[in-house]
Image (cartoon, rainbow, N blue to C red):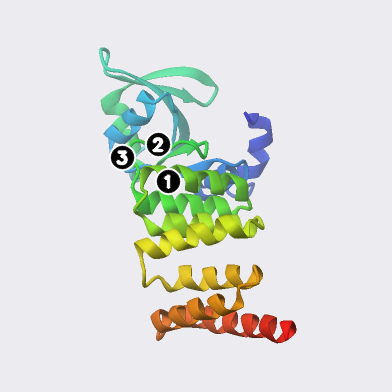
Amino acid sequence: MAVAPAVLAPQTFIPKRKGTLQAELIGAARRHGRVAYVLPGHGDALVAELSEGRPVLLLQNLGTDWLPRWHYAVLVGYDADKNVAILRSGRQPRLEMRWQRFAASWQRAGRWAIATLPPQAIPAHATADRYLESVIGLEAAGQREAAASAYDTAIARWPEEPLFWLGRGNAAYAGGDLEAAADKYLRAILLAPRDAAARNNLALTLADAGCLREAQRQLERAADFAAGTPLMKSVDDSRERIRSQADAGD
């Protein structure tokens, strides 16, 4: 769904700073169900997004290193014949800037740029680790359904990455779909048998489904792999919860 600038402005503007920080832009995108992916700092990544028909939000420094003038703009096109970047900049719907000048202003601003994508899309130059970070941020913003869709998209792209299966299982569990959650956790375990988090979460899912014996077996395996790590606290908490469920069933 398109969101009008008038709706977004109060969500991102910081009066004391008389402007907006990158974190506010990323947070606003996530709250509206978009995957906010910070792009790698090279021009090829920008052009690749444009070739997919996806504009890029970026930061420029239109001043100098010692007297900066920060400015957000949206890169909407690149004319290779004229070697110009095409921007939506301020109140200008189409600003053509020589690519070298544009690249220099972007360089002075730290080469920061984001693609704000629907959960069904992945940036052309995406890496699994960076995309996972983006989806976790979407989940943390309370966009559970959008995050689940993004995990599905990631699994289609990187089917051998266990953390995407784990994340998809967590989304299913949060939505009350125990069967789907158990299936996703098992897939994560097949890819990473020593993943204590996946086994811990599978144990909780099985316990909720009434399979207490198998839940306890999985939890003991999780405890073996979590020993000496911060995750052990979660495993101990799960052990108490499953023990309480078992006692209640006696």
Label 1 environment density (alpha carbons within 10 Å; few <14, some 14–19, many ≥20): many
Q: Mark 2 points at which residue?
A: 60
Closer to the eye: label 2 or 1: 1
What kind of residue is marked 2?
Answer: Gln
The residue that appears at 64% across and 81% down in the rendered structure is 241
Q: In this view, does 118 lie to the left or right of 208?
A: left
Please state the horizontal and vertical placement of residue 109, each as a whole percent of the image: 37, 42
Please state the horizontal and vertical placement of residue 126, each as a whole percent of the image: 35, 43
What kind of residue is marked 3?
Answer: Gln
The residue that appears at 36% across and 47% down in the rendered structure is 158
Please state the horizontal and vertical placement of residue 54, each as a whole percent of the image: 44, 28
Looking at the rendered structure, which numbered label has been put on residue 107?
3
Find the distance from the CA under tag 1 to the CA under tag 3.
30 Å
Q: Residue furthest top?
A: 81
Q: Is residue 61 above or below residue 208?
A: above
Q: What is the count of numbered marks?
A: 3
Q: Is residue 80 left or right of residue 164?
A: left
Quadrant, the C terminus: bottom right
What kind of residue is marked 1?
Answer: Ala
Please state the horizontal and vertical placement of residue 105, each as a whole percent of the image: 34, 34
Q: Name the residue under label 1.
A: 154
| Depth check, front residue: 199 or 72 | 199
**Mark 3: secondary structure:** helix
Find the distance from the CA under tag 2 to the CA under tag 1.
30 Å
**Mark 2: secondary structure:** strand
Looking at the rendered structure, which numbered label has been put on residue 113?
none
